[in-house]
Image (cartoon, rainbow, N blue to C red):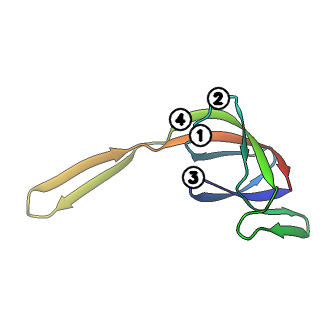
Amino acid sequence: MYAVIKTGGKQYRVTSGEKIKVEQIPADVGAEITIDQVLMVGEGESVKIGAPMLAGATVTAKVISQGRHAKVKIFKMRRRKHYQKHQGHRQNFTEIEIGAIAA
């Protein structure tokens, strides 16, 4: 069984037991969270599609860790103008493990 969920403005196709990194969720490590924004649930040939969300469908997940991705370096330069700008960014993430998918 798989589901398509929406969290942090992005969509993820998840199955039970899978670990994914999503945009930061304010939850403690080890906490159980429930994601109720389920767009689609499928199992074999049967597929249920919401319009836009599937009513009553939930996905439970366990928070494994909170962290930050690798640094993305931004470098801007204008040739012959003596302009250079260095910048960096590290995005926060929450790693979750998908538990039960309830349709």
Q: Residue at x 8, y 62 (%)?
A: 81
Position of 12 relative to 95 (above/below): below
Q: Where residue 58 appears, x then y in whole percent?
A: 79, 51
> What residue type is disc 4 on?
Gly
Asked whether 5 or 36 is in front, the reply is: 36
Local secondary structure at mark 2: loop
How far is mark 2 from mark 3, CA to CA? 18 Å
Q: Which residue is mark 4?
A: 67
Badge 2 or badge 4: first in the primary sequence = 2
Q: Quadrant of residue 47?
A: bottom right
Badge 2 or badge 1: first in the primary sequence = 2
> What residue type is disc 3 on?
Gly
How far is mark 3 from mark 1, CA to CA? 11 Å
Badge 3 or badge 1: first in the primary sequence = 3
> What residue type is disc 1 on?
Thr
> What residue type is disc 2 on?
Val
How far is mark 4 from mark 3, CA to CA? 15 Å
Q: Which residue is mark 1?
A: 94
Q: Which residue is mark 3?
A: 8
Nearest to viewer (mark 4 / mark 3): 3
Q: Residue at x 81, y 47 (%)?
A: 16
Q: Which residue is mark 2?
A: 29
